[in-house]
Amino acid sequence: MRLLFLFLCLIPSLHADKLLDLYKLQGKQSGPTLLVFGGIHGDEPGGYLAASILAKHYSIQSGNLWVVPNTNKESILHYHRGVNGDLNRKFSAISHHDPDAETIKEIKELILHPEANLILNLHDGHGFFREKYQNTIFNPGAWGQTCVIDQLKLDNNNSYDDLDCIAQKVSQTLNEHLLQDHHSFNVRNTQTKKKKNEMQYSLTYFAISNDKPAFAIETSKELKETVQKAFYQLRAIEAFMQIMGIRYQRDFELNSENIKSITKSNGVLTINDNISLDLDNLRKNLRYIPLQSIKNDLCFSHPLGGVKEGNGFIELYIGHKKISHLSTTPFPLEKCEGLFEATVDGERKSIDLPSEVNIMSDIVFHAPEGYRLNVIGFTDPRYKNELEIKITASSLLKRFSLDREERKFRAEFYKQDAFCGMVVLNYVARKNQ
Ligand SMILES: [Zn+2]
C-alpha cells in the first residue's frame, strides 16, 4: 500500500516536533492557567466538541487557558474509546513500545508545566450519578453529570487544594441552568488512593500525585444530543475559570442552539499551501485531487480535523464525522511564480494561489508564459489549456463541482507536469440561472 505520508499542520503555539495540538489562549493581564484535555476517550464527543469550541470561540482577558482538544486523535477518528487500549489507564506505567507512549509523555509534560495551575479532563460517562441506587441509569456507579475528584483535598497549600469545595461550587453553578431537571450535577469522589481502584492509572490521579489540582468533568452519554453535553462541559469550564479568576469572552451566547450552529461549520482545509477547500457542502467524493506522491501538508482550520489515508485516496474528517473521500493523483509540485490575473465579470484583478473567486457571470484567466490552466468540468474539446478563455457556469459540467450546491469549480494551474496551485471558482449567482 502506497501511503501519502500526510503531515497535519502545526498550531503556532506548538513546538514542531509535538504530537499534541495545544492551543494557548493568553490574557493581556497575567494570572493563573487552566489546562483542559478533550477527547482522551475517542467515543466521548461532548468533551472534544467542547474543547474545540474553547480553542476557537473563546478569548482570554486575564490569566491563561490552554486547551488540547483532541488528546486521543486516532481514537477520535475511529470513534473508539482507545484504539491502542484505554489512554486514561496508562499514567502510572507505560511500556516504551506502547503506541501511546509519546502521547502520555507529552500529556505529563503539560500537566507538570510550572504554569499549569489546574487541570481538567473532559469525558462523557454512562448514566446519571446518584448517591442512592434508583435503577440502572440513576445510581452511585454512574459517571454521567459529575465533577469527579480523586480525594477531598491536596495537602500542599496550593491555591486550589480544596478539591471537594471547588467541585461542589462547580456543580452548584451547573445546577442553576439545567436543560432538564434530571440533568443535575453531583460531585463523585473516587477515593482513588484509599480504594486503590483503577483510577490510580488515570490522568487526574497522576496530576494530583504531583500536587496539581485536577478534576474530570463527566457529562452523561444518556443526553440525547452531543451539543447538550458540550453545553454542560463549557458551563463547567467557565465555572472553573470564574473560581480561578480567569476572565474570558466568547463570540456567541452559550446555549445549545448556538453550539449546534457552530458545529455545522467544518472550516477550511489547506493542502501544501496551494489548495484551499471550504469543507462545508463539499461533495462526499472528489476525484483527481493533485497531491504529491509523498510528504503532503494538510492544515485544517477546525481543531478536530483529521485524515485517514490509503492507496490513492485520503478521507477527511472533523472529529469522527467523515467529510469527504478524495481520490488523489500524484503530481510534483512547483511554485507558481509571476503575475497571475483574471478578468472577473469584466474587471481585471490579480489572483492569489490558492484562493476562491466569486463570479457573477464569467472569468478569464491570464498567466505568465509556461503555465497551463485546467478547469475541471470544462469540456470544450477545442482547448487543451483554458487560459484566456471565457468560462461561464454553463460551460461547466455540474457533476464536476466541488460542492453539493454545484456552484464551486476547480481551476488548476500547471507548469509542464508539475501542479502549482488551485483557484476555486464560485459562481455565486448560479442558483438563479
Ligand atoms: Zn471517558
Image (cartoon, grey):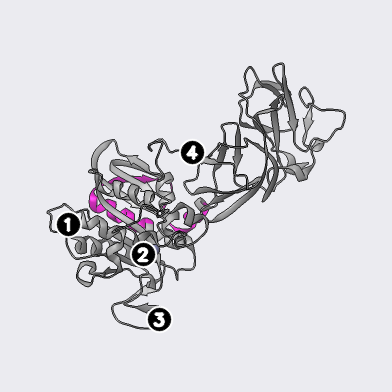
Of 40 and 47, nearer the camera is 40
Mark 3 residue type = Thr
Q: CB under 8 Å between callouts 2 and 1?
A: no
N-terminal-most mark, 3 or 1: 3
Instruction: Kindly state the secondary structure of the residue where label 4 is placed.
Output: loop
Residue 164 at x, y percent in the picture: 21, 64
Mark identifier at residue 9: 4
Mark 1 residue type = Asp
Place residue 254 in its image quadrant.
bottom left
Crowd around label 2: few <14 · some 14–19 · many ≥20 (10 Å): many
Mark identifier at residue 161: 1
Residue 375 at x, y percent in the picture: 75, 33
Where are the magenta residues, as a range? 234-261
Mark 4 → mark 3, Cα distance in angstroms: 44 Å
Of 258 and 417, nearer the camera is 417
Q: Looking at this rendering, what residue extends furthest in the bottom direction?
A: 134
Visible in this render: residue 363? no
N-terminal-most mark, 2 or 1: 1
Q: Which residue is mark 2?
A: 218
Task: Please name the residue shown 78% across and 38% down the image.
Answer: 377
Task: Please name the residue shown 47% across and 55% down the image.
Answer: 259
N-terminal-most mark, 2 or 4: 4
- The kind of secondary structure the magenta stretch mainly shows is helix
- Say if disc 2 is inside 8 Å of ligand 1: yes
Mark 2 → mark 3, Cα distance in angstroms: 17 Å
Mark 2 residue type = Glu
N-terminal-most mark, 4 or 3: 4
Quarter of the image for the C terminus: give it: top right
Q: Which residue is mark 3?
A: 136
Residue 334 at x, y percent in the picture: 63, 25
Mark 2 → mark 4, Cα distance in angstroms: 30 Å
